[in-house]
Amino acid sequence: MRSLKVVFLLAAVLLLVFALAGCSSEKAEPAGGGAKKVVTGEGQGFNPDAPIKVEVTLVDGKINDIKVLEHGETPGISDPAFEKIPAAIITKQSPDVDVVTNATKTSEGIMQAVSDALAK
């Protein structure tokens, strides 16, 4: 009876390990090196003199990464938008996401820049 409990416990631990492994937040490169495309785009944020420029990496047609290359937004105020909007776009696979409170124009500029990149 004791060996049956040990086997059951080991099976439960293995199941938990595999379940948690699937929760990794790291972006994995596709097996076999899927089709990769890098495009850039621009959008208008709060600062009319400095557009937001982004680089969008697509792997097999899906948004895999977004990097902000340049911007003239106000540090501190715009930071939450630069942290949250790209991640939300990648998760939703669409630039149509909710804006970040108190950084509306910056959020919209990032979404516009990603839309511009995807249109290329």
Image (spheres, rainbow, N blue to C red):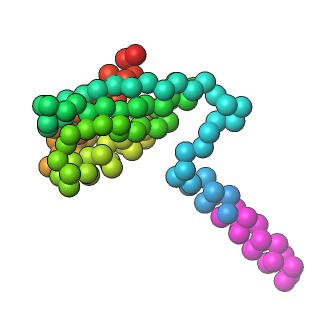
**Could you say which quadrant of the image residue 44 lies in?**
top left
Q: Could you tell me which quadrant the N terminus lies in?
A: bottom right
Query: Residue drawn 81% across and 77% down?
Result: 6
**Along the horizontal axis of the image, is 72 left or right of 91?**
left
For the stretch drawn in magenta, the main secondary structure is helix
Report the magenta residues as a range: 1-16
x, y percentage for residue 18? 68, 58
* Residue 40 visible: yes
* Residue 115 visible: no
x, y percentage for residue 116? 32, 22
Q: Could you tell me which quadrant the C terminus lies in?
A: top left
> How many numbered discs sit on the rendered protein?
0
**Could you say which quadrant of the image residue 69 lies in?**
top left
Q: On screen, 78 above or below 8?
A: above
Query: Residue drawn 67% across and 31% down?
Result: 33
x, y percentage for residue 70? 30, 37
Query: Residue drawn 62% across and 39% down?
Result: 29
Question: 45 and 23: which one is in front?
Answer: 45
x, y percentage for residue 27? 55, 45
Query: Residue drawn 52% across and 52% down?
Result: 25
Instruction: Let me know if residue 93 is in the magenta part.
Output: no
Question: 98 and 104: which one is in front?
Answer: 104
**Could you say which quadrant of the image residue 43 lies in?**
top left
**Along the horizontal axis of the image, is 53 left or right of 13?**
left
